[in-house]
Each structure stands twice: as structure tokens, then as C-alpha cells.
Image (cartoon, rainbow, N blue to C red):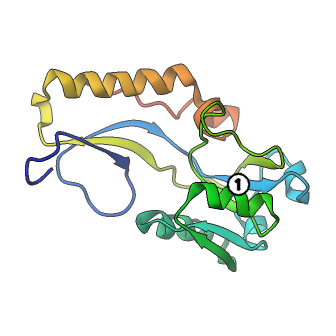
Amino acid sequence: MANGELDLVLTYDIGEDFTGAITPVCRFPAHALLRCDDPLAQQSTVSMQDLAERPLILLDLPETRTYLLTLFDFAARRPKVALRSRSYETVRAAVVNGLGVSILNMRPHQLASPDHEALIRIPISDPLRQPTLIVIDPYGDQKPTYVQSFIAMLFAHLQDLGPENFAVTTPAMAKNLMIKPAL
């Protein structure tokens, strides 16, 4: 974007500081990914303390790894990392095969990338920081129509999907996930 090669960037608000106009769109709270036969899978929510007791399958992407491991600071205990992978699919496969639990933020659409029947996603009960999906652009208040349209369509798409289809959270928290962009 700084070189004028991109008109916008779609990312989470974690990691490095961003330069440009930031438009928040939606929050994605962390949730636990477990095998359905894990004793924690019977609970309606799970705590970071409980998850810290289990081996962790870590989605090992540059900013994601730091964010996910920092969540365990809430429990004052870091888990043993059993496997690191840069692949969301490998993380899911490792959990299915009983290698540990994982913490993720986004739920893939079930028609596009369904979970294995042995997986369950459970909200985390602790009040953790919720990453926000943001659009960054260099235009500020002078956004071109196509950038405004992209942001509006992204928001409408997520709103049409509904939080229950892109996030794993409690009903009370689901009400606060969407952030109507001011365009």
C-alpha cells in the first residue's frame, strides 16, 4: 500500500501497527477446537485454564502464533505445544487425531470447508481480546466508490452469514460482533 500497489488490505488488528485509514468490520472471538470425545467437549464454554492443561495444536502464522500464545497469559500458564502448523486444515486434522486441542478465531463456512464429525467448537468463557477484521486503505475520508463498495459488501456478506456461521461465541457476545462501517 505504501508503494501505491494496493488500494486496500483486509486483515486482523493484531501484530504490527498499520498505516492508513482503518475501517473495522467484525470481531472474531477465540474459541476452542476439540475432539468430541474430550471431556471438555461436554461443556457449553471452556476456560483458558482448562485448555492450558491440554497439548496445544498451534496455528503457526507470523502474527497469529504470538496472539494465540498470549491468550494463555490470562490463565497464567502456557500449554505444551504438541504441533505447530501453518495450515488450518492440518490443525483440524491433528485435533481429529487426538494430538491435542486448538484455539482458533474464524469458523470456515460449512459448505466450503466442513469440520470432521469428530470435531466440536466451543466458546471460551474468559473475557479475551477479540481480534477485529479491518480494511486498511490509503484514502482516509476520500475513499473511492469501489473501496466503499467493497467494505459495504464485506459487511453485508458477514451480516447475511450471521455470527453463528463465522464465529463461535455465546449468544450474548454474538450481538456485539458486527461493526457497521461508517462510510
Between residue 41 and residue 36, name the one nearer to us: 36
Task: Specify the amino acid type for callout 1.
Answer: Ala
Vertical arrangement, residue 168 with respect to residue 54, above or below:
above
Whether residue 135 sits left or right of residue 58 in the image: it is left
Whether residue 149 sits left or right of residue 112 in the image: it is left
Q: Secondary structure at mark 1?
A: strand
Estimate the x, y position of residue 12 in percent, counting from the top left.
40, 50
Q: Which residue is mark 1?
A: 32
Instruction: Write down the quadrant of residue 51 in the picture.
Output: bottom right
For the residue carrying disc 1, how many other residues have a C-alpha within 10 Å: few (<14), some (14-19), or many (20+)?
many
Residue at x 75% of width, y 61% of height? 95
Between residue 75 and residue 110, name the one nearer to us: 110
Whether residue 178 sits left or right of residue 165 in the image: it is left
Residue at x 42% of width, y 68% of height? 62
Whether residue 29 sits left or right of residue 156 in the image: it is right
Classify the position of the C terminus by image quarter. top left
Residue at x 24% of width, y 55% of height? 18
Residue at x 66% of width, y 41% of height? 168
Q: How many numbered circles does the render carry?
A: 1
Estimate the x, y position of residue 176 in percent, counting from the top left.
53, 33
Estimate the x, y position of residue 68 in percent, counting from the top left.
55, 65
Estimate the x, y position of residue 72 in percent, counting from the top left.
62, 70
